[in-house]
Image (cartoon, rainbow, N blue to C red):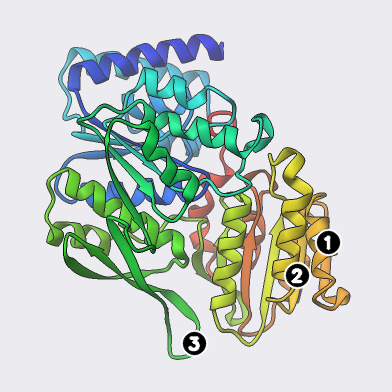
Amino acid sequence: MQSLLQRILTALAQAYLARYKPAIVAVTGNVGKTSTKEAIGVVLGTTMRVRMSGGNLNNELGVPLSIIGDWSEEYYQKGSSFFLWIKVITRGIIGLIFPLKYPKVLVLEYGADHPGDIARLVKLYKPTVGVVTAVGEIPVHVEYFSGPSGLAKEKSELVRALDSRDLAILNFDDQIVLDMQAVTKAQVRTFGFGDGASVRISNLDLNTDDRGRPQGINFKLHLDGSLMPMKIEGSLGRSQTYASAAAAIAGLHFGMNLVEINNGLLNYRGTPGRLRIIPGIRGSVIIDDTYNAAPAAMHLALDTLRDCSAPRKMAVLGDMLELGRYSLEAHRTAGSKVGDLVHVLVCVGEKAKFIADSAANQMAREQIYTFHTSEEAKSKVQELIKEGDLVLVKGSQGMRMEKIVEEIMAEPERKEELLVRQSKKWLSK
C-alpha cells in the first residue's frame, strides 16, 4: 500500500514540477535544517510566492506531498488516513487540469535515514539551490551508515546533483560541509562565524529582560560589504544565526535587495521545539529544544544553557537515538559537559543513564534523577522546579520530551506549538 502510494505521489509531484516549473531550494544536514528551511521560506516569502514543506516532511512520501500541495497542517492534525490520501490525489489531479496559483519557489527538506535516500530524492526532484547546514562529528542516523564519513557522503549528494547555473550554500564552520564544495559544479557561497565566509556572522549576544531572563538573541550579518544588525525574539542559539545567514544568501540569489532580506529576517522567530523560549511554572523559563537530538545539537543546546544567567539551572535530557556504536561515547560526552553547567539534572531513557553516570563526576549524585520515559519524568520535573529556574529540555523525537514541556509550561494554550512533534512518525525522518 505504501509503495503504491509513493509511486502515485511521485508521478503527481513530477507532473507538477513539469507544469509549473518552480525553483526548488533543498535543505539537508544533521543540525538546523528545519530552522534553515523556515528562515529561507520567511525571507523569500516577502517578495514572491513560496511554499515550505511543513514539519518534518522530508522523505519519499513527504517531499512529493509538499510539492503537490500544502497538506502539512491537515496531515499533522488528522494523521495519515486512506481518506486523506484520496483527497490529496484527487485535488492533485485537478490542479494539473486547471491552472493554480502555484509557488515560484519550493523550500523543501531532504532527509537521509539510509544510504541512497538523498540520491533518490535529488534524482526525482532536482533542486536549483542546495543548502547543507551541519553534519557534526557524530551525526544522527549514523547507525545505518558505515560511519560519519558515510553519512556525510550521503548529504553531499545534494550538492553533487547541482549544475553550474545552480547554487550551493554551505556551512563555512563545519569542515565536513565546507569540503563538499569540491564535489559540486554549482556556484558556492558560505555562511558562518569564520573569516572568509561569504556571509559572516558576528557579535552574537543574548537579549535579556530587566530580570536577566533570556528573551532572544542579537547578532550581525556581514554580506556584500554591508553590515546588517539582527534581532530574533523567542529563540536562542547559534543555530538561529546560521539559519538567518543561509536565508540571506538565498535571498540574494533570488534577486532580493538587503532591505527586503532584512525585513524578511525581522519576521523570523525560530522554530517550535528548537531552542524556543517558553514561560514556565513558578516564574521559570523553559528552553524547549525537544524536536530532536544529535550530539552536535546537544552540545549546542548545552552551550546555550551555559551562556544564559539564572539563579538555578536544570537540564532534562533524553536519549539521543540512531547513533549505533557511537551511542555510548556520545551520551557520556554529554554527561561530562552538562555536569559542570547545572544544579539539577533529569535523565530520561536507557541511554541517558550514561549521561547521568558521567555527570555524577562533576555534580552531586543526589541532584541527578533518572527515568525510563518522559511520561514517568514529567511529574517529578514539575515538582523540582523552583522560582526563577532556567530549564533546558532536550532529547530525540522518539523520547517525546515535549510531554515534559507541556507539563511545566505556564500557558497551556500554547500546546498547539507541540502539535508537529506529536504526529505519527512513519511519514517523517
Residue 212 is labelled as 3
User: Can you say whether 207 is above or below 66 in the image?
Assistant: below
Amino acid residing under circle 2: Leu
In the image, taking residue 407 as reference, residue 414 lies left or right, namely left
* Residue 144 picture location, percent across and down: 66, 30
Lower position in the chain sequence, tag 1 or tag 3? 3
**Residue at image mark 2:** 345
**Residue at image mark 1:** 370
Lower position in the chain sequence, tag 1 or tag 2? 2
Disc 1, disc 3: CB below 8 Å?
no
Secondary structure of the residue carrying numbered label 2: strand
Secondary structure of the residue carrying numbered label 1: strand
Q: In front here: 333 or 371? A: 333
User: Can you say whether 395 is above or below 58 in the image?
Assistant: below
Q: In front here: 76 or 25? A: 25
Q: In front here: 332 or 262? A: 332
Amino acid residing under circle 3: Gly
Secondary structure of the residue carrying numbered label 3: loop
In the image, taking residue 306 as reference, residue 349 lies left or right, namely right
